[in-house]
Amino acid sequence: MGNCAEGMSNYFCRQKNTNVRVSLPAVCFVWQIAMIILFGVFIRYDEESDAHWVEYKRKQNFTSDIENDFYFRYPSFQDVHVMIFVGFGFLMTFLKRYSFGGVGFNFLIASFGLQWALLMQGWFHSLDHTTGKITIGVESLINADFCCAGSLIAYGALLGKVSPVQLLVVTLFGVTLFAVEEYIILDLLHCRDAGGSMVIHAFGGYYGLAISWVLYRPNLHQSKRLNGSVYHSDMFAMIGTLFLWMFWPSFNSAITDHGDGQHRAAINTYLALASSVLTTVAISSMSQKRGKLDMVHIQNATLAGGVAMGTAAEFMITPYGSLIVGFLCGIISTFGYLFITPFLEKYLKIQDTCGVHNLHALPGMLGGFTGAIVAAAATESVYGAEGLVNVFDFEGEFSDRSAGTQGGFQAAGTCVSIAFGLVGGAIVGMILRFPIWGDPADDNCYDDEVYWEVPEDEESIPPVLEYNNHMIHKHQDISESNFSVDQS
Amino acid sequence: MGNCAEGMSNYFCRQKNTNVRVSLPAVCFVWQIAMIILFGVFIRYDEESDAHWVEYKRKQNFTSDIENDFYFRYPSFQDVHVMIFVGFGFLMTFLKRYSFGGVGFNFLIASFGLQWALLMQGWFHSLDHTTGKITIGVESLINADFCCAGSLIAYGALLGKVSPVQLLVVTLFGVTLFAVEEYIILDLLHCRDAGGSMVIHAFGGYYGLAISWVLYRPNLHQSKRLNGSVYHSDMFAMIGTLFLWMFWPSFNSAITDHGDGQHRAAINTYLALASSVLTTVAISSMSQKRGKLDMVHIQNATLAGGVAMGTAAEFMITPYGSLIVGFLCGIISTFGYLFITPFLEKYLKIQDTCGVHNLHALPGMLGGFTGAIVAAAATESVYGAEGLVNVFDFEGEFSDRSAGTQGGFQAAGTCVSIAFGLVGGAIVGMILRFPIWGDPADDNCYDDEVYWEVPEDEESIPPVLEYNNHMIHKHQDISESNFSVDQS
Amino acid sequence: MGNCAEGMSNYFCRQKNTNVRVSLPAVCFVWQIAMIILFGVFIRYDEESDAHWVEYKRKQNFTSDIENDFYFRYPSFQDVHVMIFVGFGFLMTFLKRYSFGGVGFNFLIASFGLQWALLMQGWFHSLDHTTGKITIGVESLINADFCCAGSLIAYGALLGKVSPVQLLVVTLFGVTLFAVEEYIILDLLHCRDAGGSMVIHAFGGYYGLAISWVLYRPNLHQSKRLNGSVYHSDMFAMIGTLFLWMFWPSFNSAITDHGDGQHRAAINTYLALASSVLTTVAISSMSQKRGKLDMVHIQNATLAGGVAMGTAAEFMITPYGSLIVGFLCGIISTFGYLFITPFLEKYLKIQDTCGVHNLHALPGMLGGFTGAIVAAAATESVYGAEGLVNVFDFEGEFSDRSAGTQGGFQAAGTCVSIAFGLVGGAIVGMILRFPIWGDPADDNCYDDEVYWEVPEDEESIPPVLEYNNHMIHKHQDISESNFSVDQS
């Protein structure tokens, strides 16, 4: 079944061992058992999901069960959940013969990643030092999904070139690095980054690019035949695009402040995304013969506005400010697909299958700096005295931080996230170069055959084949009957 | 790449210029920049999404952030958002080679339309005459999505026959007309139409049909080979159908009154839709040899119950009343696909690609009149004194309107929406006949090749081709080796 | 069009009559009219969806409309609704030529089932004996969807082997049996089963298996060519899998107690599902040559954790307890696909198309017993005095039931659900053997051709065919020109 056994590409075939029959089950079992043990030691329900809620509710003077955080956040959580599994998953099904791997490995690594994220984020953010326990609620689930997103973005750069075991390693380290950089940026630098332009997108994007750089494959052109879409795989990818696009307002508002915070973040993101679509279409059309649109742009660059609003969405960026951000990012991201991705591959030796540079890394970085500018420009007259304190959480040790200072810290936070992505990715890339992970050979990339039982008749849509065979046979019969062709 | 260059259809080919490389980017850029400027001048956050919310909350005596309108409407908003982009988008992917255009142009025009709708609806409904500003919140986003729906419905009639630039024009005027008719119907006539049977469906349907009538293509049969589905494109369309069907209760309840209004509208719509499915299946099966079902009916007529409940869903129509509406509309809509669509095409020269007449125009009109009847029959004993005032908003200048009078106005509103659709559509159709829009020739319709970079191997699912080529070559080899066929 | 008329399989062809042109419309019409009449007699809005809500709100001392049950449950309802129609529907599209039937008949029977469920569950659970009316609200809609799920699970075992009329019969009896067993288990035995491990999954699974056993087809191998997937049908099925997987936390929490009950059920289910994915991948990889993954396992066994948490999700099972349940069920379910399904078919004559035994019956049963154990282990120190009463509803006549006793009743409830499934399924199976239902012949199973108008060119993706024909013709031309082959 290995392609190498089937003629034609034998010459280039390096007979890499892609057998993961031992390593994949071993990693899944050992890590899942570790999760169970660590959850047993550390993780408990928080006060709003514990059966003692009635007592807690009384203590908090809540008048109704509806004030449980569940009702503020669960609808957004489910939208985010759809983005992680259907959004990211289907966005990566665009390759003609790697759709199983796109959606399937995304499923696998997110399922592991969210468990590990609950632990890592718990240790850094919500460990009760008295009891030594982490307590979780619906906001923890959202944060865990967010944390996975960083690694899923990195997967986008590696799509089709790595084994599932490598992806699990990428996720293990990705989630770990994420929790540390998030702790530095949100807690130590006291940045605001509700939708994660910095901590999710810039980090995840550069993390993936750095790994891809270390894993550079000079002979990847040998798999060129499979590095492209077909009509129906492009349609599957549009499912991913649209669910990401539609639910991005929920992504950016999922963990913002109750009330106006969630409300405003959703509006801003909605507007930025709409604006991105128009400029993406404009640039895509300008770049092609006869003004034809390119599905790659539509599938990806339309989302750039959402990425870039990850930090500023909860601020008073104003509705037209959101439109401007989307306007610019649609343009920049589409230009990225047209010019930067080929440049990165040719000159920097970075092979970026999905173009995460243009969809996540660059718009994420821009979003971080946008957030810094908007934060620096915040005034009491715009936010109200209480509003300013609420939005930027200027309380406790940060109660006398000015908006200008906050802007500086936001910019610093963006740099931290990029640095973590690049350095962390380079190190993880080195680890992934050990010849033990079962990754495919250069002429064997982008092919589900390597890690999946593809349906037997996978080489065809069977009725077509049958029909054609029928025609061919008819033809052969004719040949035979007239010329007695000898065929074995 | 233009089909005209590739033999066979040359005779009929009118060599229309479908190049949109200048016009499409120009329209996208200019209009998006106009949006930014107009948003800058007019649009601001409303009191529930502004950072001054804490003060507003205190003023309103809200006890909790959960009373922010965001929590009443955001889950419904996201459902509506999915209907607009995935629902309408995928419903239009059923054609074998126009799926990119179906979902992609839907994406483009809805993204423009919702911005323009925020402005147009704002000017008519929520302009603060003191400040000259429009304030927006989650309900505005829902209304903007609704407003787009009118133009997306019109797109259904035009699918495959127009250029993206024409679609943007359809949307610009469609949204404008929508805002005006909505103002007349909801504000001046004081009709109730929460789910938009009248203002969305009847208007959008007749708007599209009128445009299609003006753009009649006598030689459209030249594209007949592409005016149909294949197995997988029908499956993609079912994604659209189901998301529309499932979320229609949210559509009809998204902007109804808090509390019982939203609750009842969801229940009524849920029931009407279920009922439609059974009668659609019944009529579809009766109409075909051996009782076989037709995917066109299942994809469309099953939704008619939701359309027809758009006005009455918030009224006390009773659960069995909802079932009856769904029952009848499933039948009528399926009959529409069987008999009315061919009739319209043959005798009235209206080419309706998706059959929006049967799914939107007709059920929308019926829904308007259903609403009128149910409103006229309303009594205090059924609604309660307070309930009657709340449901029909009999307050202010309308405080002494009777239920009977309300019924009359509802019927009048339905007529207004149809008139706006027909007249507006005819005028817009005339505009679209100018030979500057890059629309396809008659033998070039329903083809993504015209406006999209279709994957290179688009003419095949490549492994099939490879395999077949392989077989053919093998055969040729045999021929060659045996007979030394001379081939160039 | 019947396959029997088209050569090749004539020998085996039993010329079964699959014409449903009379029976299907008749059943749809009669049953839908019956629904309307019964709804007219019995079904009314409840106090939270009736226009008298304002009065009720005042009576209940609610401070805000947000305390209407609609806002507690509607987001979960919509998630459940998606699971029923897109989740179950698309999960059953995996067969190469039965995708229309998978998603289409699912649509039909769920639409009927939910109406009948509102009546049946109403009579048993919410009939007001004073007025003789059933009142419905959003919780009724969720329960109706749940009730359908039992029959949809049964459909999974029968997929491709029955007619739509038979499926409607399966649903009629399935919903009826469901309402009775649910009444016994929840009301008489006073079990807790919010997510329905027992009442939905164990019942539905064994119901389907018993029917399939009675309908055993010894010559089903004659349809073997169609009993498998192709690349794109596997992708469609993944849409179903993922929407089921993502929304399962909503399924298990949809009708649990307001506040901590819904919150905790969602967390537990989220964790169990994540854990299932890793062990499913591990076992799937171990079982195949070179560690390749099998899509059947990924599409199904990953969901087993959600099924098995249906009872215990609302209990204080602890987060690591949830992980353990998911861990074990992922393993057991995958083993089921590898070994138990072939065993059932070979030795017990049970043909289970989708493997509902491994996804629903077995994990449902295990979930029932898990619930029993966790209930029996409940203590006041873990739940709090109030919490214990709330979670297990130890009120009224059950106010002195102990946790241990509750555990015993939970176990008994599981047995009741299995018994109802097996006995009810056997009886319904007998009814379905009457030769009047239009079911397909053994060589005609798994084929949409039988009950659907499949697109004319269904035998091909047309452009491929065209292109290949072109090549073949070119080749023929060569042959002709060189050898003057005589072709008719």
Image (tube, coloured by chain):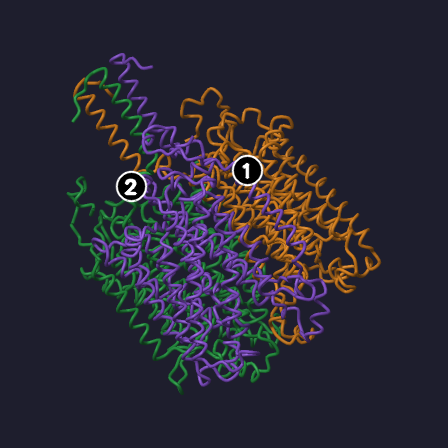
Chain colours: A orange, B purple, C green
Tell me if I can see residue C286 in this picture: no
Q: Specify the subunit that label 1 lies on.
A: A
The amino acid pointed to by label 2 is: Asp
Residue B335 percent location from the top left of the image: 29, 59
Gap between marks 2 and 1 measured at Cα = 33 Å
State the residue at coordinates (18%, 59%): C435
Q: Residue furthest right?
A: A400
Few, some or many residues within 10 Å of mark 2 (<14, 14–19, 20+): few
Residue that label 1 marks: A284
The answer to whether residue C184 is above or below residue A152 is: below
**Element carrying mark 2:** helix
The answer to whether residue C399 is above or below residue B177 is: below
Nearer the observer, B430 or A234 = B430
Residue A409 has which mark? none
Of circles 2 and 1, the one toward us is 1
Residue C457 has which mark? 2
Tell me if I can see residue C26 in this picture: yes
A487 sits to left or right of B380 = left
Residue A158 percent location from the top left of the image: 57, 36
The amino acid pointed to by label 1 is: Ser
Q: Quadrant of residue B447?
A: top left
Few, some or many residues within 10 Å of mark 1 (<14, 14–19, 20+): many
Nearer the observer, B179 or A338 = B179
Residue B41 percent location from the top left of the image: 67, 55
State the residue at coordinates (41%, 35%): B16
Nearer the observer, A430 or C43 = C43
Image quadrant in which the C terminus of chain C is located: top left
The answer to whether residue A65 is above or below residue A143 is: below
Q: Quadrant of residue A458?
A: top left
**Element carrying mark 1:** helix
Q: Specify the subunit that label 2 lies on.
A: C
